[in-house]
Amino acid sequence: MNRFSPAVPADEYLSDSNVLLYLSDAVAQLLDHKEEYTQFGVIRYFAEYFSSVKNGNHVLFREFNYIRATPHNRASFVRVFWRCYRQIGKSGDLLSMLEYRSLLQLLCPDFPVELVQSAARIVLMDDAIDCLMSFSDFLYAFQLQFYYQEFLDSVLLIYQDLLAGKSPNTVIVPTSTSIEQLPSVAAEEIDKEEQQQDGVETSTLAQCIDALCDRFKHSHPSRSCMKEVLEQTDRVSYYSFLMSLAKDESINQTIGALPSKAELLIDPEMDQELDKLIAQISVSPSSNSSGSAVGGLKEVQRKASPRRNIHHRRRIEVESDGSTEETDSSEN
């Protein structure tokens, strides 16, 4: 949306761009850490805060309610997750759902396990969620589940009604509160029912989803993309539908957080810095060179927000740990 367009009312622009939410958060952070931030100037603080929002660095170590507050925050968090743990995919390691949860909670301490379980079910479908998953499979499933959480929860309710033989005439659009209270048992029941039934008719599900999109207030995948996926078969299960959406490149481009799967593990700039770090550790393992290497690595990354200054020590520990694991995996 062009903020300079006379056709866009001011109130509409402020609402769609979430400027007031970020301004409120910036003021709250300033008041909470007034002594620290006023040392280098309030104007500079606001400039760095909104620069970090623009660059997508503002979600690191923030609470879950903040990282899910806007579509931009959600996409930024997905990208941060990819950037931090890309080396796992490059090394070919397979991790469990609990291990991915631990990685997510290093970036967001109160990240809910239910969201991680939902992403794991998309990848594993009818299998047990304690099976191991590749980084790329989990990442794209997690992106879909996290970015379109409210929409997918509504589709799940519709799918349950169709499985039970009901006609979902009333489209249920859950609020953020109802989503948090949505029992994980429902997803487990879907697993059991899908073993007995071969999903639902795609034509009926498509009609219900189209009606849902008409009145849905949150983000949702494009109708054309969902229609194309559903037209490929006569019947579909809930998780097979979501897996097809997670693999769809047009949805990935719409969200804009991740590269294509072919380029997911390619990052020459980061690889160059990691090579420098490994070389320095190899030459002088007992020296303090790792600290300077981390400093070089951080110079490549985008400028941090004032919020991240509070977690400066903690972030260095996280980056150092990640670098050590990458060194170990390369040696193995």
Image (tube, rainbow, N blue to C red):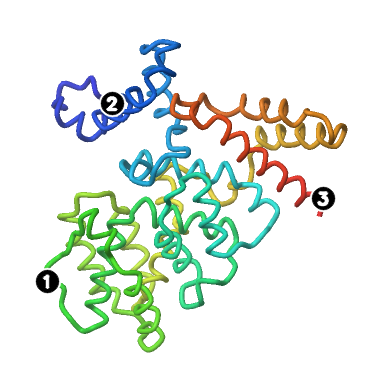
Of callouts 1 and 2, the N-terminal one: 2
Of callouts 3 and 2, the N-terminal one: 2
Q: Is residue 146 above or below residue 293?
A: below
Q: Quadrant of the N terminus?
A: top left
**Quadrant of the rendered image containing residue 41:** top left
In the displayed structure image, the side of residue 50 where residue 170 appears, left or right = left
Residue receiving disc 3? 331
Give the residue type that dot 3 points to. Answer: Glu
Residue at disc 3, secondary structure: helix
Distance CA(mark 3)–CA(mark 2): 46 Å
Residue receiving disc 2? 23
Point 60% across, 68% down: residue: 132
Counting every numbered tag in the picture gives 3
Give the residue type that dot 1 points to. Answer: Asn
Taking the view exactly as shown, the residue that stands out farthest to the front is 35
Give the residue type that dot 2 points to. Answer: Leu
Point 19% across, 49% down: residue: 217
In the displayed structure image, the side of residue 61 where residue 149 appears, left or right = left
Residue at disc 1, secondary structure: loop
Q: Residues within 10 Å of mark 1 (few under 14, many from 20)?
A: few
